[in-house]
Amino acid sequence: GVGVVQAIESKSFSSGKTESFYVLRILDTGITIMIPMGNAKQVGLRGVMDATAVRSVYKILKEREVELEPKPWNRRYRQYMEKLKSGSPFEIAEVLRNLLLLKAEKALSFGERKMLDAARSLLIKEISIAKSVPEEAVEADLRRFLNL
């Protein structure tokens, strides 16, 4: 999820090694986590997307000519979970769009409904921060062109 770097701290270990950590507060949950600065890229820590990326995300969400592969829901679920875990706003946008298209055709499973909500929440939070607008404004934009 979206987090705010609250501090950078150094910790000394009994081995004599000192390591620097990002102290992040996750906005959704309020949980504070520490990420070793040297592992930031491996765990997917990145800056908030810029205006160009926001436009690309909107373009992905608006696309309707998408071929959805008919897969068992559990395989689709695993594939979409990987995309959500990637943290890429473009992959999250694909998940949201595909689940909304699928929802228009048939009822989603409980897990898919939860995933749809998670994808929507992640995108709304990040776009809100990227555009410096309230989450409600982003939600209204999405509702307008996604027919939520």
Image (tube, helix red, strand yellow):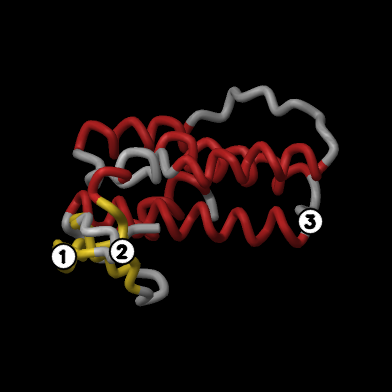
6 displayed left or right of 107: left
User: Of callouts 2 and 3, which one flags the residue occurring earlier in the amino acid sequence?
Assistant: 2
Residue at the spot of label 3:
109
In percent of width and height, residue 100 lies at 62, 46
User: Of callouts 1 and 2, which one flags the residue occurring earlier in the amino acid sequence?
Assistant: 1
For image coordinates 50% across by 46% down, the residue present is 146
Amino acid type shown at disc 2:
Met
For image coordinates 26% across by 43% down, the residue present is 38
Residue at the spot of label 1:
9
Which quadrant would residue 8 be assigned to in this image? Answer: bottom left
The 10 Å Cα crowd at callout 3, few under 14, some 14 to 19, many 20 or more, is: few
In percent of width and height, residue 6 lies at 17, 68
User: Of callouts 1 and 3, which one flags the residue occurring earlier in the amino acid sequence?
Assistant: 1
Q: Nearer the viewer, residue 36 or 98?
A: 36
For image coordinates 61% across by 24% down, the residue present is 66
Which quadrant would residue 115 be assigned to in this image? Answer: bottom right
Quadrant of the frame with the N terminus: bottom left
Q: How far apart are marks 1 and 3 (CA)?
A: 43 Å
Mark toward the viewer: 2 or 3: 2
Q: Distance between the residues labelled 2 and 3?
A: 34 Å
Residue at the spot of label 2:
34
